[in-house]
Amino acid sequence: MKPDVRVEDISVRAFDIPTDAPESDGTIEWNSTTLIVASAKGGGRSGVGYTYASRAAAIVIADTLAPLICGRDCFDVPGAWRDMVAAVRNIGWRGVCANAISAIDWALWDLKAKLLDLPLASLLGRVSDSVEIYGSGGFTSYDDARLAKQLRGWVERDGCPAVKMKVGRHPAGDPERVRCARAAIGDAQLYVDANGALSRKEALDYAYTFTDAGVVWFEEPVSSDDLAGLRLIRDRAPPGMEIAAGEYGYEHFYFRRMLEAGAVDVLQADATRCCGLTGFLEAASLADAFSTPLSAHTAPALHVHAGCVVANFRNVEWFHDHVRIEAMLFDGAPKPVGGRIAPDLARPGLGLTFKASDAERFAI
């Protein structure tokens, strides 16, 4: 029989980590990334989870979620998830609260797997041993030399079969930037991401312009809230160019609406936003029901486990900022081999240990 093991403590810390250079995409600029790290303790073990979000997520965890989860059965993660979603009804499930739930959900899954002495991917049931990654960065704040060096590095050093760059801040200059990227990466696949910066007509125009450089993935050509616009671009884009979106989904209703609208060729989900691993697996089930591949947005150290248990999984975004942070602050962060990453099956849970002392200089 399963032992009665209860969650004894939930704790949370917030950290602000500067980027290694100014960064921007089609709509915003930033120079730091906020990391929220949650810990769940029980049965002599500690699980870790995290999200990339506003520091407000830490307040939601401390004030609303931690009192709710303490004392619960460590093995009933879905039950805890349902109660967390219910608890934030009056302050808004989507956005900051979903980020907060994500961090706790990951910590609880990590704790459960550690109590059972199993890697998380093995606990859930692996359908693959590793997942494909694509290099992602290519910020609009980069000059051509830095852009080319970064993209080339992912192809030559890490074996990435595809790389992604940002577009949309200065659309008139994007065709030349895309040509620069193509020259740098040879035969690797090229993705572009406008972060919803373009109008429908602009996006269509650039879809055909970008196809001359062999672009095969156009992410958020228009706002992801404009489902009719995404469908329009998808229907009229050049053959061989996939339309992707979904990273701003916080709950399964969002993903269902996007799929029902026929808005994307590839659905994206971010398990640091969509209420954790539990929410991510819901998105995966919906994508599978619509015969649509699923791609994980950023946070590769988390998504490596999630991707290995999803049959319709496409790839993980090897995002520059998060790769850098996870390598700095988490022992056990995955390393690419031939354009793929794999969970460490010699370690229980997520296989991650948070380097609290190293992170202290970034504490908020």
Image (tube, rainbow, N blue to C red):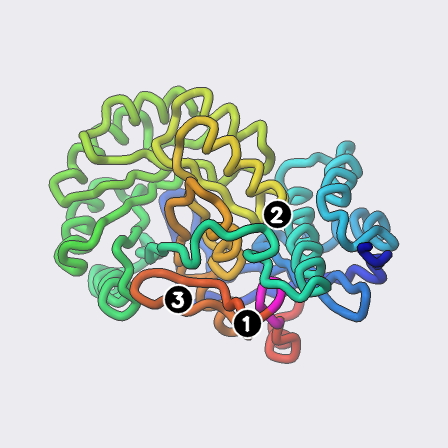
Q: Position of residue 305 (x, y in %)?
A: 52, 56
- Residue type of the residue flagged with mark 2: Gly
Instruction: Give the magenta-colored segment's residue range.
Output: 348-353
Name which of mark 2 and mark 3 comes first in the sequence.
3
Q: Are marks 3 and 1 in contact (CB under 8 Å)?
A: no
Mark 3, Cα crowd under 10 Å, few <14 / some 14-19 / many 20+, is few
- 10 Å crowding of disc 2: few (<14), some (14-19), many (20+): many
Quarter of the image containing the C terminus?
A: bottom right
Tell me which amino acid carries mark 3. Answer: Ala
User: Which residue is drawn at the image coordinates 23% and 49% (left, top)?
Assistant: 190
Say if mark 2 contacts mark 1, CB within 8 Å.
no
Residue found at x 28% / y 64%: 154
The residue beneath circle 2 is 276
In terms of secondary structure, where does tag 3 sit? strand
Q: In the rendered structure, does residue 165 fall within the stretch colored magenta?
A: no
Q: Between tags 2 and 1, which lies in front?
A: 1
- The question of residue 350 being in magenta is answered with yes
**Crowdedness near tag 1: few (<14), some (14–19) or many (≥20) residues, C-alpha within 10 Å:** few
User: What residue did someone put label 3 on?
Assistant: 21
What distance separates the C-alpha of mark 2 from that of mark 3?
29 Å
Residue displayed at 71% across by 58% down: 112
Locate residue 304 relative to residue 338 in the image: left or right. right
- Taking the image as shown, residue 216 lies to the left or right of residue 23, namely left
Marking on residue 346: 1
What kind of element bears circle 1?
Answer: loop
- As measured in the structure, the alpha-carbon distance from the residue carrying label 2 to the one carrying label 1 is 23 Å
> In the image, what residue occupies the spot 24% across and 23% down?
236
